[in-house]
Amino acid sequence: MEHIAALLLVIGCSNTMAECRELPVPVSVFATADECTAERPFAMGDVQGQAQHIVAKCLAVDPALEDDYDQIVWKVRPDGSLDASLAISSIVIASNTLRPEKDYLSQQ
């Protein structure tokens, strides 16, 4: 299995930067950061016209955490710059697979 080294995040915003959303691009994961950086201007061209202001950023992927990332946290600042990172949520789900059998006569 090939590892992912970078993820391309493209965000489209209104002219006032008040409303922003992620924009889908044809290719968003890359084996190297350099490939992501090279594709960035082409991806921005692909989504041209979908928003008044478009910003994009290549996010580094830690190979040790590749399968654990479950969030992209981003914010577009009023000056148009994009702050973004990959994150792992802090939600923990507990499960007990060894449950005692229910005695339906004494338990509800």
Image: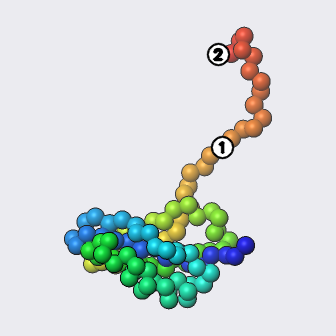
Q: Residue at x 50, y 89 (%)?
A: 38
Q: Quadrant of residue 100?
A: top right
Q: Amino acid at mark 1?
A: Ala
Q: 81 and 4: which one is in front?
A: 4
- Nearest the camera: 76 or 94? 76
Cα distance between the residues tagged 2 and 1: 23 Å
Q: Which residue is mark 2?
A: 108
Q: Measured from the top left, where is residue 11 in percent x and y?
A: 38, 71
Residue at 63% over, 69% down: 66
Q: Residues within 10 Å of mark 2 (few under 14, many from 20)?
A: few
Upstream in the sequence, badge 2 or badge 1? Answer: 1
Task: Say if residue 78 shows up in the picture.
Answer: no
* Image position of 42 (left or right of 30): left
SS at mark 1 in the image: loop
Report x, y in % for residue 53. Answer: 29, 76
Instruction: Specify the label residue 94 is tagged with.
Output: 1
User: Does residue 9 sit above or below 68 in this rendering?
Assistant: below
